[in-house]
Image (cartoon, grey):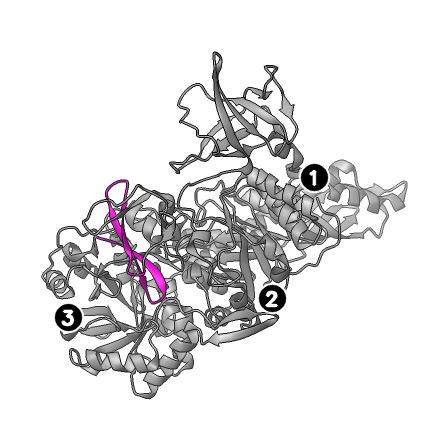
Amino acid sequence: MPTSPRPRTPELLAPAGDFAAACAALHYGADAIYAGLARFSARADAANLTPAQLRRAIALAHGRTPPARVYAALNTLVQEHELPAAADALEDLDDAGADAVIVQDLGVARLARRCFPRLRLHASTQLVVHSAGGARALADLGFRRVVLARELTLDESARIAAEADIETEIFVHGALCYSYSGLCLFSSHRAGRSGNRGRCAYCCREPFAPVGADGRRAGRPGFPFSMRDLALAPLADRLRRSGAAGLKIEGRMKSALYVAAVTDFYRRKLDGALDGAEEAARVQDLQTIFSRPWTQFYAAGRDTPAAGIVDPSAVGHRGAPIGAVEAVARERDGAWLRFRAARALEKHDGLQIELPAGGKPFGFAVLDLRRAGSRRPEVGVPAGTTVEVRLPPDETPPIPSGAPVFCSASQAVRCRYEIPVPRASEARLARPVSVTAALRPGGLTLRALAADDPSLAAEVAVPAALVPARQPGGTEAAVRRALARSGDTPWQVSALEVDDPHGLYASPAALNEARRMLFDRLAAAHEARRAVRREEARCALHAAPAAVTAAVAGGGERWTAKFHLDGPPCAPAGEADDVVLLLGRLSPQAARQRLRDWLGFAPRERLRLALPAIARGQETHRHLSRNVPVCPGEAQTLRATVEALLAEGWGRWEFADLAGARLLREAGAPPDRTADWSCYGLNHLARAQWAELGARRCAASPEDTAENLAALAASGGPELEVVVWQHTPLFLSETAPVTAGAAAPEDGIVFEDRRGGRIITRRLDGRWVTVAREPFCLAAHLDALRRAGVRWFRADFSWSPAGAAEPAAAWRDLRGGRAPAGTHTANFSRGLA
């Protein structure tokens, strides 16, 4: 563990999927840890921490010199019926003294601001903040830090840190999502397990086979969306200068051993405490515990090829490369694998071999080990030894010469990283109290006042005949000794005043009884206070601002049709009550031209212009020592287009994220604004927040359920609009899928999964969009939605691929309440995990 002094910024932030991992992170130099509770954690399948364990972790962190920090992840979307439980979880975090709460749901953030203002708000990467505009919008809402989208370059991250009045945090190591985090609906739509709810089924790690133009498989299955692991250690100097407040390691699903090794490695690397040989050894340690192949993703620039980001051949943990197969010798006692081991090897280590067929590597434990040419068994051999390891007797695949061999588990590495886990008494979160002890002839009185909350107090009086002390000077020391024995209570005496004008003696039994009574009453007062706070928070759930609870003016059923502005105009545009046109990345000139075409199908007063969910900032390239802007970024182009069209009188708009809402407000857009589904409003508090940001109407998420949609329709606030037709974007990615060693063609590719389901990935607005071949459709449930109070319905054709059903035909089916064959309803009826 490093002992040299280190700068305190940027802080190194490590994962704590359980209490042992929290201890490992702190022991090996993390400045902060982040952990989740059992509910509302974006890593729902991690062990997570109980409230008691969270308190212990906070005590352990705050007791260090200098103190470390603990951030609690409450970073999932919350449905309407879950708000009371979310309020209780916030109260737990506030009472425990968490240094911040990491949130995705703006309803949860709104509740925290209103009822638990001491909790510092950090925005999860699930909020998809990728520009200074999005970061500024969060600052406006009271957030103190934002975890930026992983897809950003370090130049982009540094620009946001410099331009936005909010701390930034960037990921530096760990697993990557193929899609922008927060905009992935693949697991939700295909498996009923929402990544936005911490239940991702990791569909991007599954095998997919390309499909040819004839509709048949055109090759063997690969892993076109399976990302390598992020590893930015080689960019340590740039990370230190990035302006980020925090450098974050992913890994709440990983073991305490992994957390120890990765934290130790980055701590030493950021402190400049590794020479070349030691760094290589630490890298091997880390890869042995867990590692996919590594990538710097787009940190150094946006021109990183997809083949350096996606690993299409194999999935899962590899280990540290230690050699290549020389031969497989078959003898009477079994088959022996021969290779030259580049690192020391011991009995009970783990090996994996990467096979030509790809997929998951073949792995096994080292149970029998010997030097090549010898029959004497060995317990361990040094690096550089040509060894033979007995292969498992069953289910061993053909192993060709030259196949890479990895060490996937190491006894030596396990022994190298000691993880001290303190006893409960050594990591107790104790709140400081000041106590006054008054001794009088008729008895003893103790009064306690919580140092961090002067309104929290307790008093006890113990009747007793106190007599003059033989040694009056010892009374105060006796009182101090008795009150110091706080045991496993949540209290610790930080200040003591002894009021003993008569020099009396109180027996240890009387002092101990008074202490127990005092701390019990203080605990009861504290729990009563917590109950009041919880009730206040639950009451706040029903107190929406008047501005968003006013009844919507009457009227009948309304329909929206959404298209891409750059696509061909079609008939539904002339029939819809609201026609939403996605601007994409069009320049002002191109947007004007395309609008002229659409005006031939729908009147201007029914056209609404929609901002995209992703619009990144200005790009730069590196030329020697200079950073030279090469072109306006997407955000700058979008702003220019919005301002030009506003100047020409276009007054109806839709935003898809925080940055877009802020852009429209800054640009002076009229109040007729709506919010697309990507804003997410699964509870009335989130919808109230979007209303305050300018939305008169909010499109519901296409991963929501019938029950929750009915609750939202009845909850008031901005008008609810339900998406009833859409080729829903399952992945929205910066990275092309990779198949057969090459990225997908610009016009896209069809993939088939192992169950026969087909998806289509293509380039759209500079990103890679993946949709299911079968559209999402709620036509058969329109009557149920009407009965629930929904009056706005949306058919979204803006993501539909070439060859999809004609919008006119789909529109006719929808308006007639007919669900065409081959459509699906996602989570609407089956529920949302």
Q: Amino acid at mark 3?
A: Pro
Which residue in the structure is indicated by mark 3? Answer: 572
Residue that appears at 49% across and 38% down: 318
Q: Which one is nearer the viewer's eye here, 481 or 137?
A: 137
Neighbours of disc 1 within 10 Å: few (<14), some (14-19), many (20+): few
Q: Amino acid at mark 2?
A: Gly
Q: Residue 653 is drawn in which quadrant?
A: bottom left
Quarter holding the N terminus is: top right
Q: Is residue 213 left or right of residue 382?
A: left
Neighbours of disc 3 within 10 Å: few (<14), some (14-19), many (20+): many
The disc at residue 243 is 2
- Residue 120 seen in the figure: no
Q: Position of residue 406 (x, y in %)?
A: 53, 35
> Are discs 1 and 3 less than 8 Å apart at CB?
no
- Label 1, label 2: how many angstroms apart (C-alpha)? 55 Å
> Are discs 2 and 3 less than 8 Å apart at CB?
no
Mark 2 residue element: loop
Residue that appears at 52% across and 56% down: 101
Dominant secondary structure (helix, strand or loop) of the stretch shown in magenta? strand
Q: Which one is nearer the viewer's eye here, 754 or 669?
A: 754
- Label 1, label 3: how many angstroms apart (C-alpha)? 80 Å
Q: Position of residue 754 (x, y in %)?
A: 28, 40
Q: Amino acid at mark 1?
A: Glu
| Residue interval drawn in magenta | 746-773
